Image (tube, grey):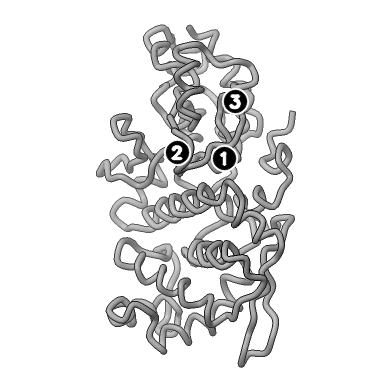
Amino acid sequence: MSMDFFHPEPTARSSWRRAVLMGANTRTYKFALGAALLDAAAEGRSEILLKDLAVPYAMSLVRHLGQAPQVSSKVVTGESDFLAVAEREAAESLRLGHPTEELLAAAVRSMPAMVMRKFHNLRGGAEVPHRFYGVTGSSRERVVQLSDRLREIAQSEQAASLRSELVARWSIVETSFAADIGRSLILEGVAVDMTTLQITDRQRRRSISGVTDAVIGFQHGLCMICAEPVTPGIDDIAVDHVFPYSSMRLLRPGDRGAAPDLDAVWNLAPTHAPCNTHKSNRPPTPAEMTRLAQRNEAIMQSPRPLRRTLQLTLQRNGYTGTRPGEWLTFIQRVPGLM
């Protein structure tokens, strides 16, 4: 059985999710570009002037700058860096409701050489199999050609979910850039507030993202129980304990470590609310355990802190947290601990 994220659904939508959820991040440019691309493609456009695409790109970054850092503390930015310009022009751009001339010019100048060159990249130098745009024209008037694949996913039944996943990933990444809590996230991973179903940092217990938006992309936007699409805003959604919480009191420590925490990210999965109600407290089926393992292996391909959270779960239960296939082995051993 393959644990590769792309194998079960080799589609443009999976390529998009790989680019957004699994690419390396030292800045948040990719998320701003992704949001702007989805909006343009949702309108059915086949092309858009770069200067027009730069408007929502720049404004979304300006808004996020007021919430959290948009660049890793390890990156040194100069006066001409786009984020440095954005910080200088943020207040005036927000007052106007559109980018200042200086901010727009900086965005148009930097986008082709930076984020638009790297959007399709994955860690390790690989690229996603599908291309979502190309840039044509001269430096005086560049045009962004939007691919059929991009329009297909931007107008699909999972478009709303793709947007929510992007927003959640952006929040997770920018929080990891914050000096006061970033180190905690990198070392300790995240926690889950089961009352609100929010992912939080362990240091301040500040909400970072909802559980559903943070992880559903890694399970291809599908219900963990019935394996059919979950549509935010249309379907009633529940977060399921794949191994039921009622089993917590029955768990004993394994030979490899402590008893698994069933309230942690590794065991929580978005589902249709009716599926969750019908499942009730029954244990997961073999198919559900396989899907959970595949989802968790996909998260392990993403940058920190979600990857670190799952890695720590494996390590606390006697695994390395670095070898492919460990999630399926661990999950298949959980029933034997009850």
**Quarter of the image that includes the N terminus:** top right
Residue beneath disc 2: 212
Characterize the local packing of mark 3: few (<14), some (14-19) or many (20 or more) Cα atoms within 10 angstroms.
Answer: some
Q: Is residue 267 left or right of residue 95?
A: right
Mark pair 2, 1: CA separation: 10 Å
User: Which disc number belongs to residue 100?
Assistant: none
Residue 22 point in image, percent of width and height: 58, 50
- Three-letter amino acid code of the residue under disc 2: Thr
Residue beneath disc 1: 221
Mark pair 3, 1: CA separation: 12 Å
Residue found at x 41% / y 68%: 60
Tell me which label, 3 or 1, sits earlier in the chain.
1
Residue 172 point in image, percent of width and height: 41, 50
Place residue 121 in its image quadrant.
Answer: bottom right
Q: Describe the element under mark 2 as helix, strand or loop.
A: helix
**How many numbered discs, if any?**
3
Residue 158 point in image, percent of width and height: 57, 46
Tell me which label, 3 or 2, sits earlier in the chain.
2
Residue 215 lies, with reference to residue 83, above or below; the image says above
Whether residue 130 can be seen here: yes
- Three-letter amino acid code of the residue under disc 3: Cys
- Three-letter amino acid code of the residue under disc 1: Gly
Residues under numbered marks 3 and 1 in contact, where contact means CB atoms less than 8 Å apart: no
Q: Is residue 112 left or right of residue 168?
A: right
Place residue 4 in its image quadrant.
Answer: top right
